[in-house]
Image: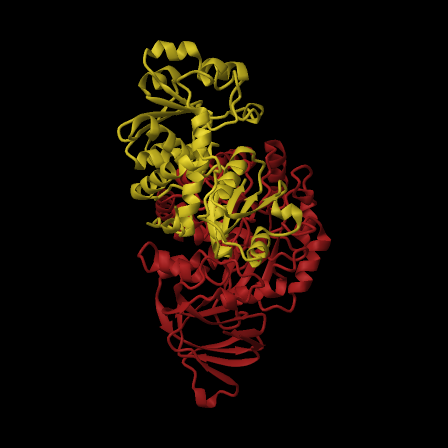
Amino acid sequence: MSVKKADKILLTGGEVLDLSSGNRESIDIVILNGKIDKTGAIEQSSFQGTVHDISGNIIIPGLMDMHVHLREPGREDKETIATGCAAAMAGGFTAVACMPNTTPAIDTQEVVRFIKKKAEDELVDVYPVAAITKGRKGKEITEMAELVREGAVAFSDDGSPLMDTSIMRHAMEYASMVNTPIIDHCEDSYLAHAGHMNEGLMSTKLGIVGIPNAAEAVQIARDIELVRLTGSRVHIAHMSIKEGVELVRRAKEAGLPVTCEVTPHHLLFTEADLQHYDTHLKMNPPLRTAEDVAALEQGIKDGVVDVFASDHAPHTLEDKNVEFDAAPFGILGLETILGVILQQLVNRGVLSLEAALAKMIIRPREILHIPVPQIKEGEPANLSIFNPNKTFVYDASRSKSKSRNAPYDGMELPGVVWGVVNKGLLLTT
Amino acid sequence: MALSSSHLLGLEGVPASDIIKILDTAESLKPILDRPIPKVPTLRGITVVNLFFEPSTRTRISFELAEKRLSADTVNFSSTTSSVKKGETLRDTVRNIEAMKINMIVVRHSAAGVPYFLTRCTDATVINAGDGQHEHPTQALLDMMTLREKWGTLAGKKIAIIGDVKHSRVAGSNIRGLVTMGAKVVVCGPKTLMPPGIEELGATVSYNIDEAIAWADALNVLRIQLERQEAGLFPSIREYHAEFGITRDRLERAKKEIIIMHPGPINRGIELDSDVADSDASIILNQVTNGVAVRMAVLVLLSGMDSASD
């Protein structure tokens, strides 16, 4: 992997994929000082610069993962902004939104500034999600207006569900005043108490305390009612249950500004895969049942699901190589989300390639009010380039992340990333 | 003669032939316990570590006696603090002990799956002495041995497991073992203490203690942890005893002989009344004796030393 300046390059032989029609067109692209200078058929012999033959690859506006944990500040042993960005690039992404469960939490302007500063020279756009409440403690709301001014794109107490419905109501009212969405990790912490996996036959078999679907469903239902009350925009993070699909479907039918995301691991795995107490399959929300996966797929087909996000959650080997109950929740995802989505949805005919990609390019940015990159002359070059027909074997030991906690290790996945372009930089894998 | 698995992690997936082999071996070893010198050299040279991360009296003593009767070298490690708090990971603890050249590990831990986890960090043979609310296979084996002694068979017999099924590894292993052996199992207790999907393990759920008693040939009465009441899972000790307690009155109404078992320690007067626990129908102390024999059998069969047995 190497990052170079994209000051004078020609990408030739690739096909630009139109995300609305699915049409592919062979277009050469000249990038000058980070901007798309020319598109069309470019005569190579007359071009003064670096020529990259990207035949076999498709070109799309840069992918965005709106749910990642970069661990900086606080747990730089697990991930840093630099290593998280490296993993994002390796996975074909040019933008991420990072969650505020850092130490300290992203609950002040200083921390937002720190992250923006650290990410300044990265190819990847890093958009901080600030906490809803100070210290993510669920008591007092953060200085939302100033956090937005500093660059926060959403608010979330991710991982520490805001149980006080009245505080959530006020947070929604205040956030909607500054026109910024709330992203909610929906979990009733009383119902989920001491749980480590899905509650059901498998938790009974394994003797592990379970987290019932209802723990997620009651909070989704609560949030939807608060949206009805406050008019705030709410995005349901990593939705994993069939009940959630129905709740969000009805909210959308009622015209409420509710959106949701689904992770690749909740589509690829089920609780049945936990038979060997593999802590690399321990995450929150937990892996659910085949019935839930089928409902998520139906929701994806029907357009209930807006976004695919990885919930990239790095943890050290020491943290994960312990008793199941003692292991933290979370797995890596940035380097494999594209492959898993292609495999589970596109190759299995659930969704077209362009519709799947739109949920990782257009929808996350629309939800977070970030301009969607355009592949047009004069626009900044913000591109992802990959070959959907080639496969690769994922090797977690060679991950660009600082951590290795990926259940995908050794899996063959489609979608080989050639490279990404953004902020005047080109990375080729 | 060996078992189909090199560890005993639970009774999930253990075939009837293995269970029969363990119970037969236990029966043949049991007379050793009544000899003037109750000791055989079968496991001489074999080192067994008893790793107890959770307080235990009878299971630990039972294993230790079984090991000593077989002339194994034994080492006890007890720790009630979790590995994380102690500052050393479980993996490190076990790998260090293994580096001292040991053969078998008997493990009790509050977290489910720890015995399986140990098989991935060591080459030693692992025996589960109870993991969280998952399984406690030697307890179920000794329960089955005791019932088989009484009846000659388990096939078609009706066993009701009473009480906190949800948090009980004893129930977890008993259901699996009994179903494998062709017995019928009812689980009976408050709905708050019933785990989801338990029917799929082959048990029938009842919330009516009198119906369960009327149906059963034997009752295996589980210990009720008093902290479950504090956690709001049942309203009071008084109501628990009234609704699910095993009393002489209840048993007499059934008008038939019903065997009474309990894995211990008993909360007398709560889940089981004293006059029932100490009655002729009770085989609770036979369970304890058979516990040593069953654990001897498991140790012998897993050590691969069974052919050398005298």
Say if A82 sits above or below A170 in the image.
Answer: below
Q: Nearer the viewer, residue A261 or B233?
A: B233
Quadrant location of residue B151?
Answer: top left
* Residue B224 relative to residue A270: left or right: right
Q: Relative to the observer, which residue lies in front, A165 or B126?
A: B126
Residue at the location (41% across, 67% down)? A393
Q: Report the front residue among A271 and A107.
A: A271
- Looking at the picture, how far across and down is residue A195, in whole percent? 52, 39
Is A313 on the left-hand or right-hand side of A385? right
Q: Is residue A75 visible?
A: yes
Chain identity for the colour yellow used in the image: B
In the rendered view, does A412 fall on the left or right side of A176? left
* Residue at the left extreme of this rendering: B156
Q: Which chain is red?
A: A
Q: Is residue A247 visible?
A: no
- Locate residue B133, reporting x and y percent: 48, 36
Nearest the camera: A359 or A213?
A: A213
